[in-house]
Image (cartoon, rainbow, N blue to C red):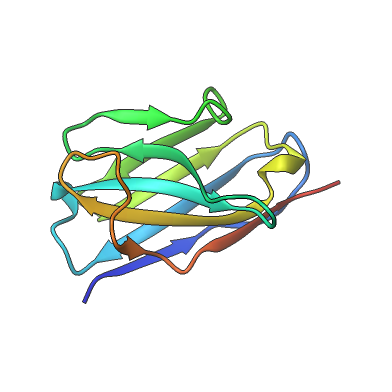
Amino acid sequence: QVQLVESGGGLMQPGGSLRLSCAASGFIFSFYSLGWYRHAPGKERELLALSMSNGGINYAESVKGRFTISRDNAKNTVYLQMNSLKTEDTAVYYCNAAPGPTVEAGRYWGQGTQVTVSS
């Protein structure tokens, strides 16, 4: 069955860096667009970065220049490198998989990993 397993979250001071990983199984990884989302208390879920199956990459304005999405199709893993972290980056971070080159979220979600940015 399809599984997405995020890891790499934790507590970091403002200005620090974290790298999230999402290991996927149960589908042909290279055929899917992979996205990183976050959900903070009291806010709507936000799409942060998208790596489409056709090679296209999109970023939300809130993270552009600070976050970098990458994927390793041989390892079935998508990453989110987060630099210059801010307190407002505190949220649960999720990866998502959708078939084909799409900007729409698919039906496959990971369980999420908590990122807390605090001094």
- Residue under the point 64% across and 50% down: 43
In the rendered view, would you say 104 is above or below 84? below
Percent position of residue 65, x then y = 54, 22
User: What is the residue that sits farthest to the right in this orientation?
Assistant: 119
Question: Which of 108 and 45 lies nearest the eye of the viewer?
Answer: 45
Percent position of residue 115, x then y = 64, 54
**Number of labelled discs?**
0
User: What is the residue that sits farthest to the top in this orientation?
Assistant: 65
Name which quarter of the figure residue 10 lies in.
bottom right
Name which quarter of the figure residue 21 lies in.
bottom left
Q: Is residue 25 left or right of residue 96?
A: left
Percent position of residue 26, x then y = 19, 69
Q: Is residue 85 left or right of residue 76?
A: right
- Residue under the point 34% across and 61% down: 23
- Residue under the point 36% across and 38% down: 50
Q: Is residue 61 left or right of residue 41?
A: left
Percent position of residue 28, x then y = 13, 58
Quarter of the image where the N terminus is located: bottom left
Question: Which of 104 and 89 lies nearest the eye of the viewer?
Answer: 104
- Residue under the point 33% across and 50% down: 105
